[in-house]
Image: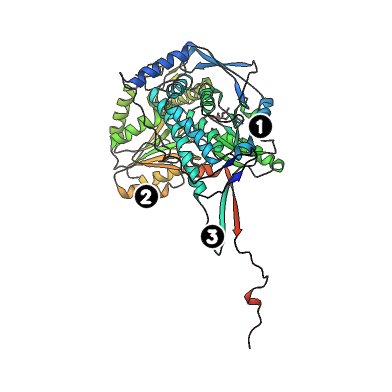
Amino acid sequence: MNIQLLYRQKYKTIIMISISRPPKALNEPVKSYAPGTEERKLLQRTLDELKSKHTDIPMIIGGQAVMTGNRKEIRAPHDHRQLLGTYHEGDKTHVRKAIENALEARERWASTSWEQRASIFMKAASLISGPFRYKINAATMLAQSKNVLQAEIDAACESVDFLNFNAEYMANIYSEQPQSLNKTWNRLEQRPLEGFIFAVSPFNFTSIAMNLAAAPAIMGNVVVWKPSPSQIYSAKVLMEIYQAAGLPDGVINMVFADGAEAADEALAHPLFAGIHFTGSTDVFKSMWTRVGQNMNIYKSFPRLVGETGGKDYIFAHPSARAVEVATAISRGAFEYQGQKCSAASRAYIPSNLWPEIKCHLLDDLKQFSMGSPEDFSNFINAVIHEGAYDKLIRFIDQAHNDPEVEIIAGGRYSKDHGYFIEPTIILTKDPKYTTMHTELFGPVMTIYVYNSEDFEQTIDLVDQTSPYGLTGAIFATDRYAIELASKKLINTAGNFYINDKPTGALVGNQPFGGSRGSGTNDKAGSMLNLLRWVSPRTIKECFLPPVDHSYPFLAEEQS
Ligand code: NAD
């Protein structure tokens, strides 16, 4: 831990700084919500409470609620009749206001001691783990159509983990100090970036939305956060939690504006210091391009952190166990309707195992029930919105009409009451078929059955078929096959799994992120991510400064 001395702040307080450490971070235990449990009752009560009222959601800028009167409806994706609330849409003037408020808050926040920052976010973790648990889960279930387990592992547990582990990583980062030779003391300070961070979050994980704003903020940065319109209902709860945890006004500002308009404004500011983005690859590329165009405007080189799309695979070797592969596909492809960036959406199955795997898979899918997340017996819920639904059914219809492929399960859909699409399995004879390489982001898995003699050639197919590199899994009992696939597929996945489904990364256990078209791989939920939000300053202090300019080599030679 770096030793800091007594110092005087501009508020005339004298603070004694000690060398402290935050409590050891531990993963938040996942509650079961089994029938008869207390948590199930409390969650059901919270669902009823939320549904019984219409929530009107303002932007939060400088700690103040900002209402524009331009109200947009929030409806449950699984039930069009269920109007949950409205939010006040803003525009670039609100983004500008949020930037001004963030920059006003910056000096005081950046100079606040790290223990205070850690305490605020660890308190937020405790609030999510305790009094806000059911509210954040219920909001995520209703507005993002997640079943109770998916909401619990995301909104409650992963949020708590991000917050607690980030506090620990921050302390570790500050403790990392250089050596000091020859009567000097070398110190490393981790300065917050000079400006504001623009955080832009996706719809699919409440915890990601939380972390995109909170990770830069815990490191002393100020943030303008633009959540996805489809996650605003739970984003509001996150803001309530930050405020209840005592986060000072202006440190995180939440704006609801069109993404491109917000980006135009934020990325044109001289003090724009970084993007913290999760979402689709094209959106990130468009922001990166804009940053390049604006490069001469900025005071510093901005940090660009983006975790983007995926075309994640399950690859079975002829030695794999069929039931394990089938289970990994059932869970890995269809949980949360395949709307996880890590969701498996292409599989390579050897011909010797296909009959057995197919049998298990069709059996699993028969047992999936689909409907509202409020009915806890439903494994599958709705996809997020009409745009996603329309895109997905286009690919399903194309598969229905293509003689080269066969839909062996699912393939039906309806948006009469909500955006429901059956978990669908497409079997293709063409390993480069469109759904083997295009990210669909829904409950559609495409399977290619390869000749079990051709394992090595199939490795090359896995490597070369998709532009992404997010997650992937090899299933085998043959250790040489695992070794070969691990080596040859080194660039296909930032998160690689052996005999496990490629989803469900746990903070502190499997830092998450991919390369190629899947992003900058800055590993959310690890120290690597936090390092992007600081700029180190090295300080060298000399205890005995030299008093003679000459060096021994200058001395005259003795004859
Ligand atoms: P999206 O790209 O449509 O939206 C993400 C955010 O960007 C939203 O807030 C949206 O409003 C905003 N946005 C849209 N257009 C914009 C523009 N032109 N400029 C700036 N911002 C803009 O993504 P989504 O549908 O919310 O989420 C799904 C995508 O996210 C998938 O591609 C998925 O793979 C990816 N994802 C990746 C990870 C990861 O860790 N790699 C995690 C979750 C989701």
Q: CA distance from mark 2 to mark 3?
A: 44 Å
Residue nearest the viewer, comparing 546 with 28: 546
Q: Which residue is mark 3?
A: 180
Task: Point out the tag, 2 or 3, that comes first from the N-terminus.
Answer: 3
Instruction: Name the residue carrying label 2.
Output: 484
Give the number of the mark in front: 1 or 2: 1
Q: Nearer the viewer, residue 443 or 9?
A: 9
Please tell me whether mark 3 sits on a helix, a strand or a loop.
loop
The amino acid type, in three-letter code, at marker 1 is Ile
Query: Could you classify mark 2 by the number of other residues whose Cα lies within 10 Å: few (under 14), some (14-19), or many (20 or more)?
Result: few
Q: Position of residue 224 (x, y in %)?
A: 61, 31
Q: Residue 416 shows which numbered tag?
A: none
Disc 1: which residue: 99
Spatial CA distance of label 3 from label 1 is 40 Å
Respond yes or no on whether mark 2 lies under 8 Å from ligand 1.
Answer: no
Q: Secondary structure at mark 1?
A: helix
Q: Is residue 5 above or below residue 322?
A: below
Three-letter code, disc 2: Leu
Q: Residue at x 43, y 33 (%)?
A: 343
Residue 478 screen position, x and y as percent: 29, 47
Above or below 79: residue 539: below
Residue 510: in sight, yes or no?
yes
Q: Quadrant of residue 62?
A: top right
Q: Going from the N terminus, do you reach mark 1 or mark 2 first?
A: 1
Q: In this view, which residue lies farthest toward the right?
A: 297
Query: CA gap, disc 1 to disc 2?
Result: 50 Å
Identified by mark 3, the residue type is Ser
The front one of 44 and 445 is: 44
Residue at point 40% right, 26% down? 152
